[in-house]
Image: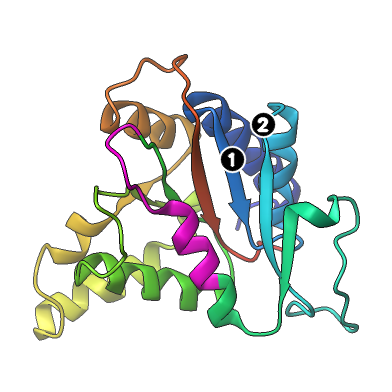
């Protein structure tokens, strides 16, 4: 099992790296855990952030419409998860070939899995609303998602998922360098090149 602090630091570093690579706005669920690490990494890179916050996240005892440190004009508080998912998907849509966006799924709980599989289905059915392909990265830090990947592989053996289909819909990354290398290759960029684009980060956080 990963050390939660080490995982948080890894995600912060990754968010900073991707924000610099794509020169992007980082959109998250504006919650605790790894979502907070993603925000702080982007801010460390001096890049803009935005969020779609749920009033009461899992594990929280009280509801709050306010983020502890983000300016109110940078996030929206949602009552329902559907609104958050819609906003995060819209943030990742590419309307022009010069747009560089990505969806990054972090280790998380039930809400994260809900978001991950909905976006996976939208990409599978070509209903994500993007004119150009959007890279989808599953961050398998410390093998967090390995048993889920085994389940999907078994689903292919049962015939409920086409063999090889899921693998073609996303990129499973074991660490930060693999993820940044993949994005640089996807967009044909050296790791230092930047542009004005966005990255959408899915995941409610390891310590949720």
Query: Looking at the rendering, which quadrant does residue 65 occupy?
Result: bottom right
The residue sitting at 49% across, 71% down in the picture is 86
Are the two marked residues, 2 and 1, in contact with CB atoms closer than 8 angstroms?
Answer: yes
| Dot 2 crowding, Cα within 10 Å, few <14, some 14–19, many 20+ | some
Q: Position of residue 145 (x, y in %)?
A: 43, 63
- The residue that mark 2 highlights is 47
Looking at marks 2 and 1 on the same chain, the residue that comes earlier in the sequence is marked by 1
Residue situated in front as seen by the camera: 69 or 205: 69
Q: In this picture, which residue range is highlighted in magenta?
A: 85-98
Indicate left or right for 186 with 65 as reference: left
The residue lying at 47 percent from left, 29 percent from top is 22
Q: Left or right: 143 with respect to 171? A: right
Can residue 12 be seen? yes
* Residue 100 in which image quadrant: top left
Residue 80 placed where, x, y %? 63, 85
Q: Residue 12 sits in which quadrant?
A: top right
The type of colouring in the image is rainbow
Marker count (numbered): 2
Q: Position of residue 36 (x, y in %)?
A: 74, 52
Does 9 sit left or right of 90 as displayed? Answer: right
The residues bearing labels 2 and 1 have C-alpha atoms spaced at a distance of 6 Å
Q: Is 158 left or right of 69, judged from the image as shown?
A: left
Mark 1: secondary structure: strand
């Amino acid at each position: 099992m990963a050390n939660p602090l080490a995982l948080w630091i890894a995600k912060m570093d990754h968010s900073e790296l991707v924000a610099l690579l794509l020169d992007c706005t980082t959109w998250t669920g504006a919650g605790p855990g790894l979502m907070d690490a993603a925000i702080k990494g982007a801010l460390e890179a001096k890049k803009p952030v935005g969020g779609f916050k749920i009033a009461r996240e899992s594990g929280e005892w009280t509801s709050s419409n306010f983020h502890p440190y983000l300016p109110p004009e940078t996030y929206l508080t949602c009552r329902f998860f559907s609104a958050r998912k819609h906003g995060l998907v819209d943030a990742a849509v590419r309307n022009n070939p010069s747009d560089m966006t990505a969806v990054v799924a972090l280790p998380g709980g039930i809400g994260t899995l809900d978001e991950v599989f909905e976006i996976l289905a939208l990409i599978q059915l070509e209903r994500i609303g993007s004119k150009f392909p959007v890279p989808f990265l599953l961050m398998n830090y410390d093998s967090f998602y390995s048993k889920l990947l085994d389940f999907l592989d078994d689903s292919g053996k049962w015939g409920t998922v086409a063999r090889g289909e899921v693998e073609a819909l996303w990129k499973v990354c074991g660490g930060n360098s693999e993820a940044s290398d993949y994005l640089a290759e996807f967009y044909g960029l050296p790791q230092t090149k930047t542009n004005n684009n966005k990255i959408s980060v899915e995941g409610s956080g390891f310590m949720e």
